[in-house]
Image (tube, rainbow, N blue to C red):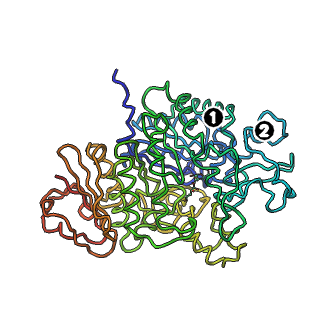
Amino acid sequence: MTEPDRDWWRSAVVFQVWPRSFCDSDGDGIGDINGITARLEHLERLGVDVLWLSPIYRSPHRDFGYDISDYQALDPLFGTLDDFDRLVGALHDRGMKLVMDLVVNHTSDQHSWFLESRSSVTNPKRDWYWWRPARPGVEPGTPGAEPTNWRGFFSQPTWTLDPTTGEYYLHLFTPEQPDLNWDYPEVRAAIYEMMRWWLDRGVDGFRMDVINLISKAPELADGPPIAGTVLGDGWDGYANGPRLHDYLQEMHREVFADRPGTWMTVGEMPGVTVDLAREVTDPARRELDMVFHFEHMSVDRGVDRFDVRPFDLRSLKDVFGRWQAGLADAGWNSLYWSNHDQPRAVSRFGDDGRYWRESATALAVALHLLRGTPYVYQGEELGMTNHHITSLDDVRDVESLNYYAASVAAGRAPSEVLAAIDEAGRDNARTPMQWDASEHAGFTCGTPWMPVNPNHVWLNATNQYEDPSSVFSIYRALIELRHRCPTVVHGTCEMLLPDHPHIYAYTRRLETQELLVVANFSATEQALPFDTSWALRPIVLGNYCGVSESNSGERLATLRSWEARVYER
Ligand code: TEU
């Protein structure tokens, strides 16, 4: 019996499903597990290896599932454990794996652990969370009485006064998402037991939510003031804390070490640096297989995620260049343009108008042949675009709603704030999946919890499956290339033309094979400053010519609008 390939995920491609908006099987207008099972053929057609499932656990849905009230029960909205077991079976029958979302920096405030913890200062679960008295000398409940001045991820103070005991509890996200105190051993033991329970049920790994926030600096010191607010930046107090590596290594020992082979872990780590990622993903350290960083998600952002700035390809190439080089000989990269927290990539980095197909596929080619594990977010493989809001009534996401309230309270014009939310808000990623041109895009036969993007009449899966030049077909070809070409998986990567404002290019090399990947990130035809030795080499894949067209040489000289090509020699 051959030893299972512990590094299988290096050649895998992951497909992320945000269950609420993928496919509704029971007509209540909300996606569910049976809807996912019914659509597995879509994943099979695409050729992906892993399904990453955003949270389906019992939840009050204050943050759409990232506020969990019971880790070992499914939310009835999404289905039953039997439905879940059927999904796991169906995936494994197709040779695919399932990665669950692990949200253990915080729970829901409706979780029994927190209900016990808040019940009294002497409750055995009191220290499962972070409780502190009001700031000395300040009346509890008055502004500034919070134990630290930290601003949370969703524009709020990170402490809420609990009337039951008159103390404050910490929450880096909404008040309905109290942070767990990982320094308390019973907390970690309970989490590891829960993870083993899911692995025993056939789960193949975990995507770990904000995992670099689990270790806080125990002194809980105030942060430097944030301009225009009464709050401070507590980053140094709650991120990449002193025990992070200890806890990741302990988790590895307690949950994975005695489990042969076939699981994978990826940690979401806002603000992680290349150096920290090298440590965390170094196999010798037995922490995580890979991490999600956000540096490329802020190349077009200013003070915060709603402060949209012009996008410069050179800064994007700088980010990818540093991460490719930084993890070349140790650790491993994750590769993504999209997820459920980011606006649609083609609308953000591409052109979702005249050059929609060309730019959506150029983005795919530019990303998917880099060294690392690619992640495709539901709808990205179809080139789904941002939707547009006209009023606050169209907004569903708590992060955007809080941002609106805080910004308007600070005197900004509501229309200006709405425009920022329209462009950068997370709801852009959360419109229902566009399966066909029918009324609700084949997502539901009921009323969708959120309107379907009207462009579904032409932008949908059914329209793309048989079209060799479609966004879907290019994604499928890229995934197929990764599966059959070791150079794409294991080859070295050298970024080229770092200062070119419009061309994104790099080479991949392994033994005697070399691939040249070039993409024009503009609507203007671009000359290609490459030596002619590439001129007559075969094109392995192109978004203007589809797959492996003989190369008539002269074309190497230029790239058409948003054209991308892959050469081999
Ligand atoms: O996201 C955490 C997180 O870092 C994002 O809010 C991120 O800062 C932002 O999108 C960057 O632009 C995770 C989940 O992915 C998100 O859906 C949850 O809301 C959050 O944690 C709390 O669980």
Question: Measured along the vertical axis of the image, is residue 282 above or below residue 224?
Answer: above
Dot 2: few (<14), some (14–19), or many (≥20) neighbours within 10 Å? some
Which quarter of the figure has residue 12?
top left
Measured as percent of width and height from the top left, residue 436 is found at 45, 59
Q: Residue at x 68, y 35 (%)?
A: 187
* Residue type of the residue flagged with mark 1: Ile
The residue depicted at 23 percent of the width and 62 percent of the height is 545
Q: Quadrant of ligand 1?
A: bottom right
Q: Nearer the viewer, residue 442 or 155?
A: 155
Would you name the residue on which mark 1 appears? Answer: 191
Instruction: Estimate how packed mark 1 is, as few (under 14), some (14 to 19) or many (20 or more) residues with alpha carbons within 10 Å.
Output: some
* Spot occupied by residue 265 in the image (x, y as percentages of width and height): 48, 39
The x and y percentages for residue 310 are 46, 73
The verdict on label 2 being within 8 Å of ligand 1 is no
User: Which residue lies most toward the top here?
Assistant: 1
Of labels 1 and 2, earlier in sequence is 2
Q: Which of 478/516 is in front? A: 516
| Viewer-closest of 102 and 332 | 332
Q: Report x, y in % for residue 21.
A: 55, 54
Q: Could you tell me which quadrant the N terminus lies in?
A: top left
> Number of numbered discs present?
2
What residue is at 48 percent from the left and 41 percent from the top?
A: 280
Taking the image as shown, residue 251 lies to the left or right of residue 554, namely right
Between label 1 and label 2, give the one nearer the viewer: 2
Quarter of the image holding residue 143?
A: bottom right
- State the residue position of label 2: 126
Q: Secondary structure at mark 2?
A: helix
**In terms of secondary structure, where does tag 1 sit?**
helix
- Amino acid type, callout 2: Arg
